[in-house]
Image (spheres, rainbow, N blue to C red):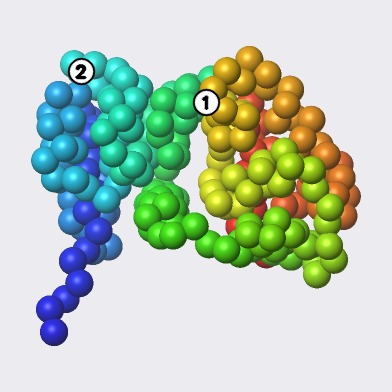
Amino acid sequence: MCPEPQPSVLVIEDDAQLSQYLQTTLRSHGFQVAQCGTWEGGRELAIRLAPEVILLDLGLPDGDGLSLARELRGLSRVPIIVVSARGREEDKVLALDMGADDYITKPFGSAELLARIRVALRHSADRSAPAPAVMAAGGLRMNVSSREVTMDQKPVRLTKNEFDLLAVLLRHAGQVLTHSQLLQEVWGDGSRSHATYVRVYMRSLRKKLEADPTRPRLLLTELGIGYRLKSDP
């Protein structure tokens, strides 16, 4: 029996020392790794190799990593994890809005990096699979076809927008979604100037789903970025 091919990761990082650390860490955990230190080279390798995950630095010598994230997102749905020393919330929001799936701030440990990659691979597999008829997280359960929702086996009545917002959060359980991403998914084009929509409906969902809406345990706020539905019980 032939062994299954290991997941492939493309590292786009111009810091030689960090790049070597990333490659060594990934290979020691069974990943196939390709590396490049430039914008143009990274784009070319991403197209030619079609990796399963991309680790992307923002400070490349021949171009900004944000524009590369946007370029790559226009070409494929490959998970992009930004690896950057820029730790401001504005930078994280911008990277996520440009198409990145996650953002990890330097310095970081190998355990955190590997966990982020596993999550990215899991989300990628979920995106390629048919949409599930039933989604669940903790005590929350949603039947997409019948549009029924229960929390701890008790029925919960939701409006159309509440249901649609919750469905997006469940589909991306464990993943941080920005205000802009949620607006686009639920309300569509032309809604980006209405950030209050998300806050209003999140507050309403918490009242219906959380034991204590002021201390949510399921629908979590990522300050300055957006929201995340906790995926584990």
* Label 1 sits on residue: 93
Q: Is residue 222 left or right of residue 129?
A: right
From this viewpoint, is residue 88 visible?
no
Q: First in sequence, mark 2 or 1: give its number.
A: 2
Which residue is rendered at x = 73% and y = 22% of the image?
A: 196
Which residue is rendered at x = 63% and y = 59% of the image?
A: 145
Q: Nearer the viewer, residue 31 or 229?
A: 229
Which circle marks residue 61 in the picture? 2
Which circle marks residue 37 in the picture? none
Quarter of the N terminus within the rendering: bottom left
Q: Position of residue 24 (x, y in %)?
A: 21, 52
* Extreme residue in the bottom direction: 1
Residue 152 in the image: above or below residue 81: below
Cα–Cα gap, marks 2 and 1? 22 Å
- Based on the displayed image, in which of its 4 quarters is residue 95 positioned? top left
Residue 2 in the image: above or below residue 34: below
- Judged from the image, the secondary structure of the residue bearing numbered disc 2 is loop
Q: Amino acid at mark 2?
A: Pro
Which residue is rendered at x = 79% and y = 43% of the image?
A: 159
Which residue is rendered at x = 40% and y = 31% of the image?
A: 99
Residue 200 in the image: above or below residue 211: above
* Extreme residue in the front direction: 146
- Judged from the image, the secondary structure of the residue bearing numbered disc 1 is helix
Q: Could you classify mark 2 by the number of other residues whose Cα lies within 10 Å: few (under 14), some (14-19), or many (20 or more)?
A: few
Q: Amino acid at mark 1?
A: Val
